[in-house]
Image: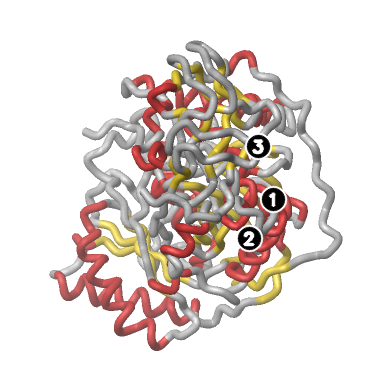
Amino acid sequence: MTEIASGTTPLSIKMNDRDNVAIIANDGSLAEGTILQDGLKLLQRIPQGHKVALKDFEAGDEIIRYGEVIGYADQTIPKGSWVREALVRMPEPPALDELQIGGNEKPLPPLDEDLTFMGFPNPEGSFGTKNLLGITTSVQCVTGVLGYAVEKIRKELLPQYPNVDDVVAIDHAYGCGVAIDGLGSEIPIRTIRNLSSHPNFGGELLIVGLGCEKLTLDRLDAGESESDVLFLQDRAGFSEMIGSIMDMASERLERLNRRKRVEAPLSKLTVGLQCGGSDALSGVTANPAVGHAADLLVRAGASVMFSEVTEVRDGVHLLATRAASEEVGQALIREMKWYDDYLARGHADRSANTTPGNKRGGLSNIVEKSLGSIVKSGTAPIVDVLGPGEKVRKTGLSFAATPAGDFVCGTLQLASGMHLEVFTTGRGTPYNLSMAPVIKVSTRTGLAEQWHDLIDVDAGKIADGKATIEEVGEEIFRTIIDVASGNRKTWADTWGIRNDMVLFNPAPIT
């Protein structure tokens, strides 16, 4: 592990006056004997992102970060020591039946200027941030054939239609071999249906099915039009299957190619927020900066959604007070209870969320991770709560209940109508979505330098005092508008990185 260079100022960060631990901010680690800014001497080597004790802890003492209890000391921890994960006992989650709803919902004033973005208009009044040909599958069985056709479309057809960005297959492991009416089955069905009508697809519907699947067209609200649906079992061999898909794609590409970007109000833009590969600096740099950008978006009239149930569960008492109404607060509690029960059925709890990488980055447990995660939601009132895959209904800030897994969360946010995602990371991940741009924000400068051609915004400069949270938040806000307008391409889109979409299916598989 690299120690900081001689002469470099040791940096530690305390987030709240109540905190009795601080975070080491320097790249690498600080050596035993290092004297911090406040005069505290380190009793042992402590890696970047990990906690140093600011007091002498006895067994059972509260360990406080962000002004909240993140755990209890399992043994004596001397002042100046490394507060390692093994020394922290996790507290119980907030009781859902005792939450205060409302009381801290503070409406944000509108911005002084009317901001716009350049989007692709759709017939029903929505706008897209990309111009894509989307092809939905009604069952996993057709994925191989469609994958062959998609590559053929990219090579042979797309060059003829320069205004179309790409072709995207909505592949999934669903449609047959499942309890199609089982408990929770409405989630994957709703997700596929809403993905198919994403605004980046320009209102063009094309479904490729097999012909004997359980996921029938009426469940997708797709009707029976032969011009929109192709069943492989109706075709005479592979060549005819591919030829038919190509013909149907050509018709839609012709129409999509006529789409042009026009000026649109930010009230037509929906931005998703997510984090992955998090570390202890996530809640210090990137997430607070994204939270500031989220507030700016809300003030500009846009729709913003944050998600990841297990990553807000331990901070839900802070979110409930921001509920804009009793109805919103109860909906938040409902989704938390649903997920608690879901995890319990699988003999798991929210502690299963925290990864080995999170812990190497300094996060002791899901409580600490949760408190750092929710700050990316900013300070706006929560105006709505969405079930998994439900479409956004209101401008302002919504909580979209999703699992925390990157690909499942991203897929569900797309189904909710997300035009663009802002994704924070400390450990690093090349994650990207084919249906919408993903702006990658690093929590530390070391990652931004290491992944200079994957990270779009470096929030690590907050930790060493080179920029404020507000300055980086403004940078993220302006980047969102530029990317949504097509004026700037994210690094992941530049390289054409595409991760699979993953459905959330809590229903039984037969």
Q: Nearer the viewer, residue 478 or 119?
A: 478
Q: In this figure, which residue is indicated by the disc labeled 1?
A: 292
The answer to whether 496 is drawn above or below residue 320 in the figure is: below
N-terminal of the pair, mark 1 or mark 3, is 3
In the picture as drawn, the residue positioned furthest to the bottom comes out as 160
In the picture as drawn, the residue positioned furthest to the left comes out as 237
Q: Are the residues flagged by discs 1 and 3 in contact, CB closer than 8 Å?
A: no
Q: In this figure, which residue is indicated by the disc labeled 2?
A: 476
Image-based side of 415 in relation to 298, left or right: left
Name the amino acid, label 1: His
Name the amino acid, label 2: Ile
Name the amino acid, label 3: Asp
Q: Which mark is residue 32?
A: none
Quarter of the picture containing the C terminus is: top left
N-terminal of the pair, mark 2 or mark 3, is 3
Q: Position of residue 157 (x, y in %)?
A: 35, 83
Q: Residue at x 48, y 56 (%)?
A: 5
Q: Position of residue 459 (x, y in %)?
A: 58, 56
Q: Secondary structure at mark 2?
A: helix
Q: Is residue 211 visible?
A: yes
In the picture as drawn, the residue positioned furthest to the right comes out as 112
N-terminal of the pair, mark 1 or mark 2, is 1
Q: In this figure, which residue is indicated by the disc labeled 3?
A: 38
